[in-house]
Image: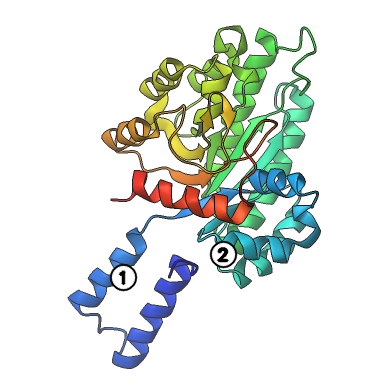
């Protein structure tokens, strides 16, 4: 069952039992078995790390999505989190995900929310994509990192001002409310930029939005790196906002440099997993173990993700 969608399995198993014995016949043992299968840990991957592994080999993951998603499935993963730019991309992905028995419980989408006109356009765009993803693939979570003024970290004076932060928070809350009305949940994501200037952007997005509308996609390593490689800052964020964590992006480093496979390293993920369990939080788990300049080069994407999957099972199963 490692490479078979749990949801697909449950539907098929239930249909087989009912066909054999009638719809009223489900023994206690059968019910317990299906419940146990449903409870098995679902581990997904974001597309970004696959881009980085393929780029290192001078290949393009998007050039042959069929082959790429076959690799994702071969790594033993249950789901795939793409970066979506249009509803047409949902149509392109759907048959391939179904072919490889991968779910798309979440997707990542870019937005511009600090400018009123751009925010209106972004919200409208996200809702169209999200409705298609939910109806076609049963998607549950939408992850967005509101775009910075510039992605060039070297440019001066590129932090949003107070007015822009207030506009962005209102737009983020509005987007979350609209998604909730449509049966989806919004998870706010950040990189290191939002941790500058006393982390004012990150904290304002959390404090100025309704927790019912805006959850947190906790990218633990961006919190860690953005705060000067600080676990103190990371676990303070969990203390402040842990109950809002809907999704967890999983990445590790050794001496500040991303490792190839997710496992032990700079961040104490054993503690992080235990903290979330203590809070009663069971987030959507998404591997995002990418490689960067200085990362070891000893394995390919499939092997790295299989190793990462096995470590996630150790941390979060049960």
Q: Are marks 1 and 2 in contact (CB under 8 Å)?
A: no
Q: Residue furthest bottom?
A: 20
Total numbered badges shown on the rendered structure: 2
The image shows residue 85, relative to residue 152, as above or below, that is below
Residue 78 image point, x, y percent: 50, 59
Q: Residue furthest front?
A: 298
**Front residue (pair 295, 120):** 295
Q: Is residue 72 visible?
A: yes
Residue 74: numbered disc:
2
Q: Residue furthest left?
A: 28
The image shows residue 36, relative to residue 224, as above or below, that is below
Task: Say what secondary structure mark 2 lies in.
Answer: helix
Residue 291 image point, x, y percent: 65, 38
The image shows residue 53, relative to residue 25, as above or below, that is above
Real-space CA distance between mark 1 and mark 2, rounded to the nearest whole angstrom: 24 Å
Left or right: where 218 falls relative to 195: left
Left or right: where 69 falls relative to 177: right
Q: Residue at x 64, y 66 (%)?
A: 70
Residue 296 image point, x, y percent: 62, 38
**Front residue (pair 161, 37):** 37
Q: Which residue is mark 1?
A: 34
Q: Residue at x 37, y 31 (%)?
A: 272
Residue 60 image point, x, y percent: 79, 52
State the image quarter where residue 144 is shown: top right
Q: Is residue 106 visible?
A: no
Task: Say what secondary structure mark 1 lies in.
Answer: helix
State the image quarter where residue 167 is shown: top right
**Front residue (pair 208, 2):** 2
Crowding around mark 2 (Cα neighbors within 10 Å: few <14, some 14 to 19, many 20+) is some
Q: Residue at x 66, y 65 (%)?
A: 94
Q: Residue at x 36, y 78 (%)?
A: 14
């Amino acid at each position: 069952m490692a490479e078979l969608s749990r949801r697909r399995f449950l539907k098929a198993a239930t249909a087989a039992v009912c066909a054999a014995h009638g719809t009223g016949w489900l023994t206690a043992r059968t019910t317990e078995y299906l419940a146990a299968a449903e409870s098995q840990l679902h581990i997904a991957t974001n597309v970004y790390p696959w881009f980085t592994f393929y780029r290192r080999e001078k290949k393009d993951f998007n050039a042959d999505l069929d082959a790429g998603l076959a690799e994702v499935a071969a790594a033993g993963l249950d789901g795939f989190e793409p970066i979506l730019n249009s509803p047409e991309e949902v149509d392109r992905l759907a048959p391939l995900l179904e072919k490889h028995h991968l779910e798309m419980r979440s997707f990542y989408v870019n937005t511009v929310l600090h400018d009123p006109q751009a925010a209106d356009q972004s919200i409208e765009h996200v809702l169209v994509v999200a409705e298609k993803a939910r109806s076609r693939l049963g998607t549950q979570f939408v992850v967005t990192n509101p775009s910075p003024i510039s992605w060039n970290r070297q440019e001066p004076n590129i932090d949003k001002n107070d007015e822009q932060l207030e506009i962005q928070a209102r737009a983020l809350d509005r987007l979350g409310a609209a998604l909730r009305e449509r049966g989806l949940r919004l998870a706010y994501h950040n990189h290191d930029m939002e941790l500058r200037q006393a982390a004012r952007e990150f904290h304002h997005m959390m404090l100025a939005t309704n927790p019912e509308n805006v959850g947190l996609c906790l990218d633990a390593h961006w919190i860690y790196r953005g705060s000067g490689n600080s676990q103190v800052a990371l676990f303070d964020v969990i203390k402040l906002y842990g109950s809002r964590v809907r999704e967890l992006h999983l990445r590790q480093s050794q001496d500040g440099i991303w490792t190839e496979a997710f496992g032990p390293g700079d961040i104490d993920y054993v503690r992080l997993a235990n903290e979330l369990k203590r809070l009663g939080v069971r987030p959507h788990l998404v591997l995002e173990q990418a490689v960067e300049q200085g990362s070891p080069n000893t394995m390919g994407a499939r092997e790295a993700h299989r190793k990462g999957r096995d470590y996630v099972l150790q941390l979060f199963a049960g």
